[in-house]
Structures are given as structure tokens and as C-alpha cells.
Amino acid sequence: MFRAIPVAILSSLALSLTGCSESSLEGCVETLAGGPLPIATARDQRFQGKVRESTARCRGGEVALKFLNAPWVDWANYYATRDAASLDDLETRNRRGIGGALIDLEYARVELLKFNLFDNAGTYQQYLTGRPGLDGPTLKTWAEMRLPPTHPNFADVGGAGEQLCTGALIRGRTLTGICNDLRNPLMGSSGTLFANNSEFESLFPDAGLNVIARNRHGDRLSLLKPDPQVISRRLLTRAQSDPAACADGHGNPGVALGGSCDYKKAPFFNVLAAFWIQFMTHDWFSNLEEGHNAPESMKVGCTSQLVAGVDTPLTPQDVARLGCRPEDAIDRGFVAAGSAPPTFTHGGREYATRAPKTFRNTNTAWWDASQIYGYDETSRRRVKRDSTDPARLQVVLVEGRSAEGDRQGYLPLLDASDPKLPDWSGQEAVAFPDNWTIGMSFFHNVFTREHNQFVDEFRRRAARTPDADSGLRNPSTPARIIRYRDVTADELFEAARLVVSAEIAKIHTIEWTPQLLYNEPLFRGMNGNWFGLLNGEGPLPDSLERALLRLRNAPSSRANDLYSIVASGPGIFGQGSGKRGWSLSNPDDVNGGTNHFGSPFNFPQEFVTVYRLHPLVPDLIEYRETRSPDTIQSHVPVIETFRGKATPFVRQRGLGNWALSMGRQRLGLLALQNHPRFLQNLRIERLQSPTKQIDVAALDIIRDREHGVPRFNEFRRQYGLRQIASFDDFIDRHLPPDSPEAANQAQLAATLREVYGQHRCDASIPITVAQRNADGSPIDDCLGHPDGSMVDNVEDLDTVVGYLAETTRPHGFAISETQFVVFILNASRRLFSDRFLTSSFRPEFYTTLGVDWVNNNGPQKMIEPRAINGHDDQPVSPLKRVLMRVIPELESELTHVVNAFDPWARDRGEYYSLEWRPRSDAREDDAFRAPRAP
Ligand code: HEM
């Protein structure tokens, strides 16, 4: 039964979406005859995003065949997966292309869930060995996820006996994130350990902890080797055509018009999207505590470079030419456990029980808007509630601001009694105040207003129908109806928090991500995560829910493998919440929609790596005003809005003008040589160094090295992607070889070679156990090149640098496929594991208004009047709705906006166009007249 249902679903998905009825295509026939690709049973037999020749021909014709041998994933070359040029006249081909891409993506997710979960809290051994009658990947509770005796809620959850969260602890999102999972109270809470997605043995490559790591990297690596500041200056710095006008990101004095900093721009993604993702990371994770790292200070390079393959000290002239700073120092990262990990033997092989070093996520790992509401007692003290209605967040009215949205107020400032770093003085008061700029101020203000909008609407309903059922229930007295009039301010505050967090999750899943990955398969995939591929229609979802429940409770890991495939039918969001007979008194209903796939949920350190997205940020913001939206009034350096300086900017100029400015401006491409100048020269007063400056680009590299993240090639192998064999693999083969862009990419490959070097290879030494060559032989130091030849040190490439160097990307991908594969796994898990986004997405927790608000993107449904990329009846997107509510003065500007993260004056054209051209009524927009970025 367990096998039959998912296979039937997969086949029907495949058939309905791929439409393989077209008889002339032998590739399709061969593909069907070969049957569905089996799910790999061993790590080194993974699918690597590469398909058989017949499958490629069936799904993408000649284009897909042409790139079969490239290291990059195949689905990007299928029919209909790019812009209009990829659409075929035959609709069946288009369906095959899109359906094939979705199938490839689902296979990737299944394999990632199967091969990439490495918990550091002590559960990994059980994951491998299982428990009597249960395979490891089907385990659902762990002793390591119990609250310890020292925890203040130890007794509340059952103390030393069986632990189960009940009563007040399960009503909403708790401050520290405990009791999201009723039977694993500690999971995902603040201060628990980051996980890993890579095998423990592959971590800390520069420490040479095993023979494979030593084979892979020789003695070429250390924390500061290759030199991170040299990498930053040579490979990450934004080139400037007019360095004086940029002034390292400071622009013209007094934020005057005319300041100019060149940056490589993404035409289909705006600056709001850049700050959105910073706002998100402040919710999900942090390696720092209250904005600082460990007390010890260390140097950060600018001391040596490779000259003809030899590590050579930098001369003063080199330092001056590079512009780096040998005197910089930073505080070291925190380490939770640094001793050698205990080991165990399983199946004749020795395994480590955890990573060689572990690290704490000082934030809650849940999607709980903790950047707004807090993640521990200290951060909560900065969260200010309205004294006249404590269900609301406190706002203040700003004198002189008279736009409609201004009446909803602005965040108050941190006051003298608030816990804070001296650096944060003058900033607005929020739970997560670090690295504050205009962007953080913007989103915090927006969602503070949104919180209050929900509360106000609830209060209006309460005034109209005080005796009506609010939908809310208290788990301690589950049968008692709570009328609107009975809902306390605290209860309403917590319901509003749930609503705001779920809205944020929805914005991220169906608005931000489909614009980050702007093509049809990802539009469907992301909407599939939320609404289900079947879009909640027809009788199937109900039977799918039952199938999911059975799969979830099956003892074999085979069932677990199939779970995510079946889940793609009804979708992850709301999983288990619609079950007939759902009861608040039954913990298995409250918790029953989650699945942790045998490994407690927390983000892996590799997730932090792929979110090091500093190139997204421009140096200067093109400031506009709603009274004349096409005109760039001034260039505001982001650095001039750093920390406390953000507050006067946001208040004096108003949220509406900032929304317009950031909404219309393109963000920075994630590419080499595109880091903001100001971030390479950031002043941090708390540092104990002569310069008191840091180069955040260099720091991104150092922190990943401190955290032991595998280098780029092994990182890809660990995630089931194909390795590269030379820096030249970064040159996009889709480009005409004689094009200027191909020449530019060849130049970057040459610079990578200079910075990272080459070595004479030895074909007798294996360098990985994660993958094998196509013929089954071990991958060796020569990566397919002749034994003894000089090969690029691609194995040493830092992962951040590698993913920025990836120019071959699926259409409309603002990120690289290496980053994306990390999201496939962890973005899904963050939904799968959270009961408030699955089985506890119900009125009992959210109120009836809350559930409707999340489902309808506000108090009532609103549909876009036009089709979007061929899809009719599209709801007005959730962030657009939020902006319409909290900044009503944007109404006329937002009329044209379909996705709040697509530059607002861009003509979206037909079918996933990436062109940078103005919509008809914005032809005068200065951004379309300005010279193009280099
Ligand atoms: C103007 C804006 C920004 C500033 C001033 C800034 C600054 C910083 C600084 C100083 C660090 C700490 C480095 C350390 O000591 O480990 C950091 C870390 C980080 N930043 Fe940014 N950043 C900005 C924008 C962004 C954006 C847009 C993203 C996109 C996601 C981002 C993602 C990260 C991540 C993932 C980390 C590592 C955090 C951790 O280890 O917990 N930042 N940033």
C-alpha cells in the first residue's frame, strides 16, 4: 500500500504534467520504458541533477542534449523553463519540460532528505542505527530534545518522566521556541546547536583531520590561507568607473545627487528583496550573541598572496595596490564544543557522533518572526507594547509626517533601560537590532504596523459581534468557546504574532522566492510547497493526507523517502490541520502534521554560508518621492543609514518614499567583484584593533572557515551536485565564445587561478567518498586530467567565492544552483518541522480571523485583474497586500506591481522576461535612462 500510492501519484504527476502522448519522440518512449529513476540507495550513486540522454531529449530537445556533459543541472535546459524563447509550439513539450523539471527537483529533495541530515546534538548515532523496530530516519522523538533539569520549564513538561508540552506552553510561539514540537520541547529553541548537511568527516578541511581531506587539499589551507583579504580585494571588490564619485560607498557629501557607485544589477529583483532576506536571516539564525562574537581577537589577513604558486608575503606596495588592511582584527567566533567528537562503529565503519566543532544558533530556528518579537529574555526587553492596548506593538507619531500611512506610526527608539551595545544607541527598539540600516528599519516598521492592523481588525469584529466565537481555544479547557469579548490582550498579541509569522513565511515562499528564482518550474514548486501541486482541488488531497499520515508513521525509511513526494500533492503548509476529527486535546493531532525525517530540526551551518548575500546590497540608494516617482532625488549611501542614522532617515522621509525608492531600484547581482565598497570598509567601534574596521567580504570567508564548511567542490559533492574540474568550468557555455561576457568570465577564471593557484596532480590519491567517477572509480586528485599535470586548485575554493563565480544558472536565478540546493532541503524542512505552519495552523491557535488573514493575505480575498505569466485568477500577492494596508499612500504605485520584489517600474513583459525596460507609464523613470552598469 505504501509503495502503491506514492508511485501512482508520482507517475500521474509525471504523466499529467509531462504529457508524453506525443508519439514521434523516441526519447520519451525510452524514458518511459526505463521506468522512473530509482531513488539512490547509496550516497555515491546520487542523481546529481543529471538525466539520461533519452530523458534530456524528451524534456528539452537539442538544447538539453547540448549541455548534458556540463557540471550544471539539466532541468534548466528543458522546454518552457526559461523565457518565451524556450516555449515550444507544441504544448505537450512545454508540459514535459516543466513537469520534468519538477520531477528532477523532487528527486533532489528526496535525496537531500535521505543523505544530508547530520545533527550535532547527539542524535546522529540513532539516525544511523535506528531503534528496535524503527529505522533511524523514522524516529520522531529524541532524549536530546528534552528540556534539561536546569531549564525553568523542566517540571512543566513532565520533568524526569516522559516529557510532553501542554497547556500554556502550546498556545502560541514561545519566546525561546520551546514546545513547538510537543514531544521534543527543546527542538529549534534559542541556543541549540546548528546542524550540518555535510558528512562530519568532510568538515574542517583545513585541519586535515583525515587522509581524504589531506589528499584533497595537501597543506595548502589554513584559517588565513589563501589570504581572505586578498581574495576579497581581488575577487570581490566592485570595480568603479568613477572612484571619486563613489568614495568607497560614501557617495557625495551630504547625500547629494551625483554620487555614483557602479554595481552589477539584477534586472528582475529589487532592493526591497535584498533587505527582505537580511530581515529573514535575523529571524532564523545567528552565530553572534547580542551583536558580538567571542572575546579573543585575531588578525584577518592582508599578509600574503600566491606568486607562481608560492605563498609570498605582501609588500607595502602590494598592500597599497590591493587596498587591504593588515592591522584589521576581529573577535573570534564562538565554539560550543571543540574537543574531538566521540565515535561509534556501525556496519563495520567508524563514525563521529558530531562535527569536530559545534556552534550554537543563538536565535530560534523557527519561522516565528523572532527578529520582531524576541528569542530570549534580553531581546524581549526591547520589544515595546502599546500601553493603551497591550495587544498592539507600540508606535509613535512623527511630527511633520502627514501621509496616510504615517498615522499608523513609527517604531519607538531604544531607551536608556533597554539592553544594548553602545553601537546601537539611537536606533529603533526591536528584538534583533544588529546591522541596522534603512532596510531593517523599513521592514520592522512595516510589520509592526501589520501586527497592529490585525489587532485593530480583530477589535472591530469584537465590537461588532462580541459574543461570536473567535475560534481561539485554550488547550487547558479545550471545549470552552472563547468569544471575541473574552479574548485577552495577551492572547490577541500572541495570535497576531502567529499571523505575522505565517504571513512572513508565505511572502517568502510564494512571493520572494519565485522572484529570486524567476521561472515557471520554481513558481509551481514554491506554490506547491504552500498550496500543493494539486492546488487544493478535487478529492485527492483528502486521500493524500491519509496516505501521508500512514507514511509518516511507518517504521521503514523507505516510507520516509516517499513522504516528501506525496506531500508535494497537498502541499506542506497546513499539513494535518484539515484532518477530520482534529482535536486540541489530542497531542498527535496538534503535532501530527510535522515530519523531521529522523533528525531534529535546526539550520545547518551550511545554510548560513549560502545566505552570505552581501553583494545584494547597493552602496547607494536611489532616493525618490511618491510625488514624483520617476525622479531620482538623491543618492543616499547605505552606510549613512547605518545603525542609529537609519532612524532620522526613515522618519524624516517616510516609509512610503523608502518603499518606492527600494521598490524601483535593482539589487546587486550575486556575482564576483560585486561586494559593496562600504562593507569592505565597515567601522565597528567595539573592535580592539587600530583600524576598528572590518572587511565583511573577507569575514564571510573567515567565518565559514572557522565553522568548518567544506570548500566549494566537496560542498557540491556532499549535496549531490556535480563537481567542477577547472576554473574554466565557470565560463557559461551558453554564451557565444567570442562574446564580451565570455571574455570577462574567462578573465575572472584566470584571476581565480592566480589567487587560488594550481598544483601538480596525483591520480593515485582519492579525494572524496561522497561521489565516484561515471565508471565507478574513485574521484582522484587529477579530476579527470592526466596524472602529473598541473590542475587548478578548485578543491580549495571557498564556497562563498565559488557560488558567486557560478554564472551558469537556471533562467531567472538570482542565486546559484549550489545555493539553491541548500534551500531545497532546508526551506522545505523549516515548513515540514513547524507545527504552526502545518497541523497547528488552525483557528484554535490563530483565531478564525487569523486563519482567514493568512489564507487571503488580509481580511478578505483580492484577485489580480490580469493573468500573470499565463496563470489566471492569481491572488494579489501577500507583501503587496501588506504594503497596501500599512502604506496606503502607495496605492497608485502598487496598482502596477505584481510581485513586490520585481522592480516596480519594470515591464514584466511576457513569460518570465528578464528585460530591463520600463512599463508604459514609467518611461521617464531616471533608472531607465541612466547608463547601464559595467
Ligand atoms: C547594509 C547591510 C548589511 C550590513 C551592514 C551587514 C553586516 C554584517 C556583519 C558586520 C556581519 C557579522 C560578521 C561576523 O562578525 O561574523 C554580518 C553577517 C552576516 N550577514 Fe550581513 N550585513 C548586511 C546585509 C546583509 C544582507 C542583505 C544579508 C543577506 C542575507 C546578510 C547576511 C549575513 C549573514 C548570513 C551573516 C552571518 C551571520 C551569522 O553568522 O550569524 N547581510 N553582516
Image: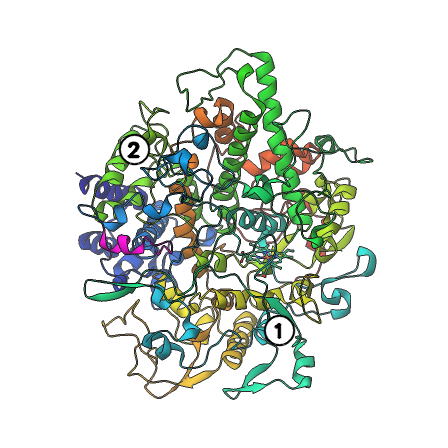
Q: Is residue 652 above or below residue 354?
A: above
The quarter of the image holding the C terminus is bottom right
Q: Which residue is mark 1?
A: 233
Q: Is residue 122 magenta?
A: yes
Q: Which residue is mark 2?
A: 545
Q: Is residue 929 magenta?
A: no
Name the residue located 57 percent from the left edge and 42 percent from the top edge.
Answer: 377
- Specify whether 774 is left or right of 264: left
The x and y percentages for residue 22 are: 26, 48
Asked if one can make out residue 528 in the rendered structure from this viewpoint, the answer is yes
Give the amino acid type for the residue marked by disc 1 in the picture.
Arg
The x and y percentages for residue 55 are: 28, 57
Name the residue located 57 percent from the left edge and 17 percent from the top edge.
Answer: 461
- Specify whether 288 is left or right of 402: left
* Residue closest to the eye, 862 or 153: 153
Residue 196, which numbered label?
Answer: none
The quarter of the image holding the N terminus is top left
* Label 2 CB-ligand 1 distance < 8 A: no
**Which quadrant does ligand 1 occupy?**
bottom right
Which stretch appears magenta?
A: 118-130
Nearer-N-terminus badge (2/1): 1
The x and y percentages for residue 94 are: 37, 48
* Residue closest to the eye, 334 or 214: 334
The colour scheme used to paint the residues is: rainbow
Give the amino acid type for the residue marked by disc 2 in the picture.
Glu
Mark 1 burial class by Cα count in 10 Å: few <14, some 14-19, many 20+: many
